[in-house]
Image (cartoon, rainbow, N blue to C red):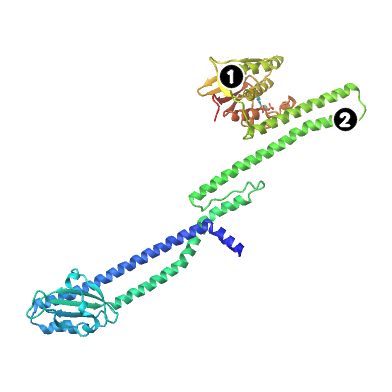
Amino acid sequence: MTSNFTRFASWWGTLALRLTAGYALAGLLMVLVSTAGLYFVLVTELERSTDLFLADKLNVIRTMLRERPDDLDALREEVELESAARRYEQFYIRLLDARNAPFMSTPGMTELLDLQHFPTQDQISPGRALPMMGKDGRPFRVTSAAVPVGSPPAATDTIEVAIDVSQKEELLARYRHWFGVILLGSLFIFPLVGYQIARQGIRPVEEIADTARHISSTNLHERILPEGYPSELASLAGTFNQMLDRLEESFERISRFSADIAHDLRTPVNNIRGEAEVALARARSVDEYREVLGSCLEEAVRLSHLISDLLFLARAESPLAHLRWAPVDVCELLSSVRDYYEGAAAERGISLTTANGHGLVVAEMDRTLMQRAVGNLVANAVAHTPPGGSVIMQAESEGDSVRIAVADTGAGIPPEALPRVFDRFFRVDKSRSQASGGTGLGLSIVQSIMVLHGGNAEISSQLGHGTRLTLHLPTSHPT
Ligand code: ADP
């Protein structure tokens, strides 16, 4: 019982039900308004035709009296016999002289109507009639007019005309009955039709919800086919599909990333294990142990760099990443990076210089992070530039942003590799980079730092001629 009620309550809360109720109510209201309107028109038209008939009768008698005032037989025939010949729409006429004495009347009129209370001329507007109840409860419409009918004729003589409208009342009663039947039928039919329309309308929404419900990481390739959907829902389905595209891409990136992490962690661990196993296989001299330990330490350092890079990227992506913002003289920052890498560059026979423009270039940033980003660029440039080459660092203001460029005259990057250099673990030449200690995370870290600063990193390169990395960052702290 309770569960039925809960089911009903939840169904009541559904869009389908609300739409059904809306459609049904609108349909019922339409039927109600149109039947009531039709009924009103019918009543008015019937009254109008009855009133015209009565006005016509008055006119006939008036004309007879004017054209043939002495032809009492014709008048009697009109007043006493004409109505008797009718089966339906029986009418009654009474002629009264100036003293209100009946002069001529249709037989039976006195028995049917309370003539004492017949409406007087001044109660009736010209051309119209009034309703009056007969003594036996039958409905009549009655009218009267001043026509000189007595002998001698006087202006205050009166003609009273009444017509039995019970046939028309019955007709109206039949109409009311059928309107009632139609309304009752509508009470059943409209909710059914409304429910069908509502179901039809929300079917695509249910399909979208259904797809959303059963999508998981294993079937992210599934999409909604918005064929036959109305344009609003087709665009909703399109947006949903786009969201799935993005999710699928992110999932693929994450699983590629996990595979790369596993691979990059496995290599140094395997090396350490291999060297240790070989060393322990038999007794070794102190120098041999020293060599093995040295090589293990090298691998351990590689591992710890890799782990700290990964940790850095994870923290940079966290919405809680916290930056220590401060205004920094960018030229001074480049000089400090140059000082740090100068020795390594000189050792490789590479000239490392700063070529700063005129004036002070200041931007709000986290100095340590930005130093790391520029340092990564310089380290890459020095690593990929042959002896005799040069690396130039430059800072320039451009409107409300600052541009930092690191350009080298090194090996360059093939055009097909350029779009991927900011991807994690991407290395153009795997073997060479790994040998030189590159983790493939350097440029990803640069990109993350730039995103944290509300800026971005760009690369351009010419194979065999050199590479230029440009960092754009806003001068003031993005809010
Ligand atoms: P890595 O740690 O291997 O240097 P990065 O993310 O810093 O990884 O760089 C990705 C790849 O881009 C590098 O493996 C290298 O092949 C290429 N690269 C980066 N900077 C340069 C450069 N200045 N000149 C040539 N190749 C570069």
Q: Is residue 135 left or right of residue 295?
A: left
The three-letter code of the residue at mark 1 reads Val
Q: Can residue 84 be spotted in the picture?
A: no
The residue located at (59%, 60%) in the rendering is 6
Q: What residue is disc 1 on?
A: 330
**Is 295 above or below relative to 155?**
above
How many residues crowd mark 1 within 10 Å: few (<14), some (14–19), many (20+)? many
Could you classify mark 2 by the number of other residues whose Cα lies within 10 Å: few (under 14), some (14-19), or many (20 or more)? few
Task: Tell me which image quadrant ligand 1 sits in.
Answer: top right
Out of 120 and 178, give the one closest to the viewer: 120
Q: Distance of mark 1 from mark 2, alpha carbons?
A: 51 Å
Query: What residue do we see at 71% from left, 29% from top?
Result: 308
Disc 1, SS: helix
Where residue 476 sits, quadrant-wise, is: top right
Q: Quadrant of residue 142?
A: bottom left
Q: Is residue 6 left or right of residue 441?
A: left
Residue 198 lies, in percent from the top left, at: 50, 58
Q: Which label's residue is closer to the chain start, 1 or 2?
A: 2
Residue 276's label in the rendered image is: none
Residue drawn where x is 69% and y is 16% of the image: 345
Residue receiving disc 2: 278
Left or right of 451? Residue 71 is left
Instruction: Name the residue nearer the viewer: 26 or 405.
Output: 26
Dot in front, 1 or 2: 1
Residue type highlighted by circle 2: Val
Whether residue 288 is visible, yes or no, is yes
Quarter holding the C terminus is top right
Q: Is residue 357 left or right of residue 375?
A: left
Residue 55 in percent (x, y) is at 19, 73
